[in-house]
Image (spheres, coloured by chain):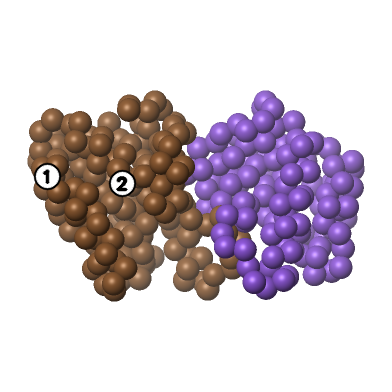
Chain colours: A brown, B purple
Amino acid sequence: MTYLITGGTKCGRSRLAETLLQQHDGCNYYIATMQPYGTSAQEAIARHREQRAGKGFVTLERYTRLDTVQVTAGCGVLVECLGNLCANELFGTEDPDHAAERILAGIRQLRQQAELLILVTSQVGADGIAYPPETMRYLSLLGEINCRAAAMADTVVECIYGIPVALKGVLPC
Amino acid sequence: MILIIGGAGQGKTDFAKTVLHQTELQSGAECPLPALMQASCITDYHLLVRRLMAEGKAPLAFTEQLLSQDPEVVVILNEIGCGIIPVDETERRWREETGRCGCLLAERAKAVVRLCCGIPTLLRGSL
């Protein structure tokens, strides 16, 4: 079962994703993609750690190369989030021209290994701003990844101010 | 007229091609205005609004004319009004004019489809 959870910032995506993961019996992984650079990233990481505390997830920090992650067969996996992963794959030390392939390979492999895969992503690109080319490239990559991940997912949910709306499939809770 | 909306990179053009079988897509950013009046499908309508404004033409009047001359057109329009309202007046007016044109197009459309992550949601009418 694969979920894609999208929405704007602070709209309840993580909360929903963690609730879904908690409902899965067995080993559950939380794959964190945010690099701890800068105060706001560190604050976000601390807030998310607190929110996850006591939920029994195994946390893996993976900023790039989702395709190299190995998890126990039949487990639950939450990836948070594809927006960070895209930025890390595009602007880090990996080859940016093959960012989409690496990310999609990672998603496919996790789908095969895990019983439950929850992908949290971001909704960007609706502000009409003509950003510099590298940012437009990021918007285009994230848009493509979101479309491809949504096609693979059983359920796609858009969170709007904490309200989950099913765009595809059925809401489980 | 069918209106396809959504943010950048959400699969609007793919939807027009695969679901609505559009093969001749004219760019609102570049295509000469007379050709747009006979277009089967216009992409980047928000950039057409910007271009019309830069040329001193009224986007809403152009849209009215398009609707009467090319009533079967498929229009692809990005949602651009979901950010902070820009301080710059040209930028601000562009979002406003785009919003007004979007409302007019949606009102007259036989179907309005919004794409998110490649998934179409029918907001109005039927396909």
Quarter holding residue A61: bottom left
Quarter holding residue A27: top left
Whether residue B24 can be seen here:
no
The nearer-to-camera label among 1 and 2 is 1
| Residue at the spot of label 1 | A54
What separation in Å lies between label 1 and label 2 (alpha carbons)? 15 Å
Name the disc covering residue A14, or none: 2
Q: Is residue A81 left or right of residue A73?
A: right
Closest to the observer, A156 or A134 = A156
Chain at numbered mark 1: A
Quadrant assignment for the N terminus of chain B: top right
Q: Residues within 10 Å of mark 1 (few under 14, many from 20)?
A: few
- Using the image, determine if residue A131 lies above or below residue B100: below
Q: How many marks?
A: 2
Q: Are marks 1 and 2 in contact (CB under 8 Å)?
A: no
Q: Position of residue A36 (x, y in %)?
A: 23, 68
Amino acid on which disc 2 is placed:
Ser
Q: Residue at x 86, y 59 (%)?
A: B58
Amino acid on which disc 1 is placed:
Gly
Q: Position of residue B29 (x, y in %)?
A: 72, 61
Closest to the observer, B85 or A31 = B85
Among the two numbered marks 1 and 2 on one chain, the one whose residue lies closer to the N terminus: 2
